[in-house]
Image: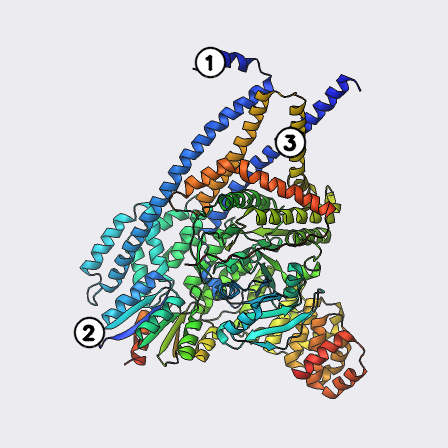
Amino acid sequence: MDSSTVKLILLIIHSLFFIYACSVILSYILLAIISAIESNQYMKRNSFVNYNEILSSTVAPSISIVAPAYNESLNIIENVRSLLSSHYVNYDVIIVNDGSKDNSLELLIKAYDLVKVDYLINEQIKTKPLRAGVFKSTNPAFEKLIVVDKENGGKADALNFGLNISNSQYCACIDVDCLLLEDSLQKMIKPFLEVTDVKVIASGGVIRIANACTIKEGKLLDINLPNKFIEIAQILEYLRSFLLGRMAWSRLNGLLVISGAFGIFEKKLAIEVGGYDTHTVGEDMEIIVRMRRHMEEKKVKYKVAYIPDPLCWTEAPDNYKILISQRNRWTRGTIETLRKHRKIGFNPKYNLLGMLSFPYWFFYERLAPIIEVVGILYFLILVALNNVKWDYVLAFFLLAYLFSIVFTLIAIFSEELTFHQYKKKGTGFKLVLVTLLEPFILHPVILYAAIKGNYDYYFNKKKKWGEMVRKGMSKT
Amino acid sequence: MNNLKKIVLAEDNSTLSLLLKFRLEKEGYQLFIAEDGKKAIELIEENNPDLILSDIMMPFISGLEVISHVRNKLKVTTPIIVFSAAGQEEMVLKAFNLGANDFMGKPFSPNELVIRIKRLIP
Amino acid sequence: MIDFQFLLDYYNNLPSLIKLVWGLVGLLIIVIIDFLLYLKYLRSHLRDEEILSKKLFADYETNLINFLYAGNNEIKVSNEQQKIIDKMVFCVEDKFKRGIFISVLSKLKNEISGEMAIDINNLFLKTGLINYSLKKLNSRKWDEIASGIKELTQFEITNVYDDVSKLENHEKQEVRNEVQLYYVNLFQFKGLEFLNNLKSPISEWNQIQLLEILQKFDDQEITDISPWLKSENDSVVLFALKLAKIYNQFQSIDILLDLVSHKTKEIRVKSIEVLSYFQVKEAKSIIKSNFSERSIEEQISFFKMLLDVADSDDENFILENTNHHNFELKLIAFTLLKKLNSKKLQSIIQASQNIENEKIFNYLEVN
């Protein structure tokens, strides 16, 4: 191998990195523009919507809120109360106690006057069986509550049980520790009802971080910016992802994932595609891909809708260990889903789903951490070989860093101009400070978690959900 | 001043509360206002009112729960009038089953409300 | 001190790519500084606006309540009321204040009816807000048009019907929706005339809104819904079906029996539901005749209907369908069998080896 071939190879490698980096930046710019347009239109469309009428309507479709619970005894009473106070008429709340080892069931029975009832379940999706049974309340004020106690089977299995037992037209699958605002249901159901030209198969919501917010007995009283770096950094991440990313994808109708913490599906379709996959840790993404794929195969025009309003508030990891475990799981979920549905990648039969969404997710979400690590390693090799022009490196590095700052700032602007949840003095300063530091502190952690996720996926098959230690939402 | 009849009003619409407070105080009642069911229960327990007015759809403790609490836990027969935008049959039935005395669907006429109040606490 | 000449030389000697990179870096730094300054301004502006908003809201709220109670029965408008009107005429010239005042009026208007509601409408007129709303109707921005119509609807301004109806076929669905809501809010059932000629689809969302508004009015002349049931526009048919059920339109039963064979599946399903509600036995033979060709939704809907109208003539039909592949339908079939001929059910249970059916049998024993 002579030096000109080596030079050629190096040139190709450099060009590939360069092209990848440029395309990432270009795609971010495009997504930012599209999401700005969509946000603007959305805010306009909603400025005069009247949600009052639908509140009292008995014609409005039935919704079941399905919330799997595992060892949630710390907060479960409050959470259930918050779910029961939704301002919607035709809904019920199905709490699926997934073989909890704690006293969640006893607490619920006592707080809500529950008694065991006879229930004939249409087992459309195979799930683990019942344990203590199905319970309903004797108090008419809690008529909407159904509690199911079953053998442990994991989140997907619990959700499937909820789908089986529900009698409603739609199912809102949420995490039980998610605080839902009272008008969430009517806002989330709206796309299903107002779109006339295509069929809306699912509607996804935005997850807001509840850490440091004042929550009293299941009601969100005050929104505060947390003080810990790790929490603020996640808020920024969520803002970028939800307000810039998903908003744009929703407009393109290329949304590949609905947050597992809050999404509504048409129940019939969810069961038709077989419910949630119990063999993956990314069941929220996987079911959406499967539902989309199903609709593409049926050649029916459809849409996955997205509501950017801050409706669902949940606790984010507040220490690095749990954060890494969470991101590790998300990475494995992404890999599993993409791998399971690889047939649709670059397949024109699947239109936008196969030709845009899937490739994008594959190259820019799934491969990105790997490419980044390879890039870093390559850079280190160059350093070792003393083949580095440090001033060039500085230039490129600054460019990348500044671009990421710009995007985060754009995300912050989106938030200020739309929902403006962080109003208090000093939060702006904190957000900017974290923006400047995030690439140095949070990003390496996320990168590490993603690489570990890849490693665990290929070499460590035994990992599953991990424990999320409940700290309990802050009380006054 | 102590022979003024006491009314607890549980309503999360501040403008409506203000309107009703104005009107009812003019009619000679003493008003206590709560923006949600939890505060309503506190006010009821503290002040032992002669009448309770409550909206049904309120933040995190509904009007139905307030009625249930008053009838079943506090075990008092204080007259209760509920009003709600969800003026559907089901809601009305549930309210009466739990022990409400009267029900008004929104939008309602404040004049009519006063008449009904006077009927319950003459 | 930085040697500018050195930097300049250095820069000029760079490859063009790196020059570009440094150029972009410089540009981005400027952009970021601008963003940061704007962010600070934006946040404090939003904060101030909110404080002002709250203050004005509370102020206008008090004004409104005083206005409503300051009337005396003889004179049209008392002095105190006039003072408030004058104040508000001045305030609403400012767009921000206008918005807040309208939201105060709306907030109360939604909750109360009767004399006081009429007083609020009058205040809307007397303060000249109506002119601003009318101006919005001529805007080029669709959201402003929709907002204007909504205001005219909320405060029940009937004499602008012509201006509003011009927008009935506006290209934007949101505007058309608002026009429809205007019609129904102000003219109740008469306002539904637009359904006669409606070509565009009317969304479920809007249908629900219209129905809720209609139900708020107590006495009304319910117009003939048959032309709507026969409409070419499927969404109009679906809406008419909802009306048929809610307003007990027995006279439309003949049309409903026809709709059971409509080309659109959803209409067939919904008409079976309405016939079920009316307990129309004549429907049975029509549906049974081509039962197996019908979609599963229609089949289940029909069986739910049988729960109310089945008689011994249907026994064989029900018996056949206890072997149906759909669990929900099977359950209803067995439930019906228990009601009609429990002896027959018992003999089936004895002979049955089907595990899935066992679940149903156990359940039926106690329920």
Mark 2 residue type: Met
* Front one among A102 and B70: A102
Please provide percent x and percent y for residue C170: 50, 49
* Front one among C96 and A204: A204
Quadrant of the image for the N terminus of chain A?
A: top right
Please provide percent x and percent y for residue A141: 48, 73
- Residue located beneath label 3 in the image: A376
Q: Secondary structure at mark 1?
A: helix
The reply to whether residue C192 is visible in this rendering is no
Check chain identity for marks 1 and 2: say if they share one. no
Q: Give the letter of the chain under mark 2.
A: B
Query: What distance separates the C-alpha of mark 1 from that of mark 2?
Result: 85 Å
Q: Is residue A469 above or below residue C245?
A: above
Lateral position of residue C128 relative to residue A53, left or right: left
- Residue located beneath label 2 in the image: B1
Q: Quadrant of residue A15?
A: top right
Structural crowding at the residue carrying mark 3, measured as other residues with C-alpha within 10 Å and reported as few (<14), some (14–19) or many (≥20): few
Q: Secondary structure at mark 3?
A: helix
Q: Give the letter of the chain under mark 3.
A: A
Please provide percent x and percent y for residue C258: 65, 70
Lateral position of residue A414 relative to residue B31, left or right: right
Q: Residue furthest bottom?
A: C343
- Residue located beneath label 1 in the image: C4
Q: Quadrant of residue B17?
A: bottom left
- Residue at the (42%, 75%) spot, across then down: B69
- Residue at the (47%, 77%) spot, across then down: B93
